[in-house]
Image (tube, rainbow, N blue to C red):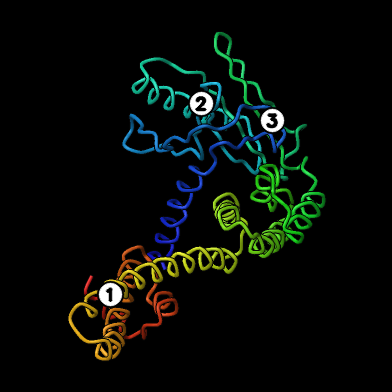
Amino acid sequence: MDKEKKIAYQNKDIMSKILTEEFKGKSFEAYGVKLPKIVDSRPTDMAAVEANELRLDRLFKLEDGSYLIVDYESDYSEDKKAKYLSYIARVAKTLYNELKYYPRLRVLILYTADVTRKQTQPFLNMGDFSMHIEEAFLSEIDSEEVWSRVSAKIEHSDRLEDIDIMHMIIYPLTYREMVEKRNAAKCMIKLATGIKDEKLKFFVLKGLWVFCDKVIAEEDAYEIRRILMLTKVEQIYEREKQEALEENTRRVTESVTESVTATVTESVTITVTRDVKDTIAKNFLRAGSTPEFVAANTGLPLSEVLELQKEL
């Protein structure tokens, strides 16, 4: 079980980094804050002086040259501001070492619907030093309006704007109760699968997985992984199979007559297809997929997948 949890966390961490790259050109204005658009993403592992690492949620470079530290909170307390100060100090040190100057830093806290604007204080005044925090309150986003708008667009195959996409990936967090959040996540996952644009569909699914991982039920998280992984398997399988078939057809055509070519090509195709399956199976086993998942999505018997696993 510990191994499975570790693999699941690593998969989510990888997906989080991929998703962050896809935020370029988008803005947090959809969440009610006036900030420039994102132009780049930055690593979020900041080496500390102590023998550990401080991990923040997101770090973006914005159009005006400033850098935005983004964190997600489901509650508010004054003592968390010390954590944000640590983020600032370590991000500043990292960027200074790279840029040789201190750029402007911003801090944005995205509060789930559990927190309202009246509950927080976005300033920290320590005399000679003060800090201002940008705040976004998902409680102020109209959940019903979001659902009505995006579901209508998907149903009629209308173009989804950036604001639609940004609202979809945080939709479950606009509810307060855990039961409501999980139900909203399940509904949004199902709705997202109907998006015609494959790139946008995968962005929404990955966004839901990364942003709402603490509220999505395990079976729904597995469904997202299944969709994303299955699509990847199909793409790799078809590409490698086609390349193998083309290469073997060329070789056979050069060495035998047309009638023999047909017979030999058929037998070679079976062999190559199996080789491709073995290759795909090994790749996914190395990536942490379970033998059961690999067997289900490559067509190989589970016993043979287990044998391949032993070879790694």
Question: What x and y, as percent, mark residue 153?
Answer: 75, 55
Q: Nearer the viewer, residue 135 or 20?
A: 20
Q: CA distance from mark 2 to mark 3?
A: 15 Å
Q: For the point 62% across and 56% down, which residue is it?
A: 215
**In the rendered view of the protein, which quadrant contains the C terminus?**
bottom left
Q: Residue at x 27, y 71 (%)?
A: 247
Frontmost residue, 161 versus 72 = 161
The image's mark for residue 309 is 1
Q: Position of residue 182 (x, y in %)?
A: 68, 61
Judging by the rendered image, the residue that carries numbered circle 2 is 67
Q: Name the amino acid type tagged 2.
A: Tyr
Which residue is found at the position 35% from the left and 73% from the top?
241
Q: Looking at numbered disc 1 in the image, what kind of residue is underneath it?
A: Gln
- Residue 167, how many percent across, how many down? 69, 46
- Which amino acid is tagged 3? Val
Q: Position of residue 278 (x, y in %)?
A: 30, 76
In terms of sequence position, does the residue under pointer 3 or pointer 1 come before the other? 3
Question: How many residues crowd mark 3 within 10 Å: few (<14), some (14–19), many (20+)?
Answer: some
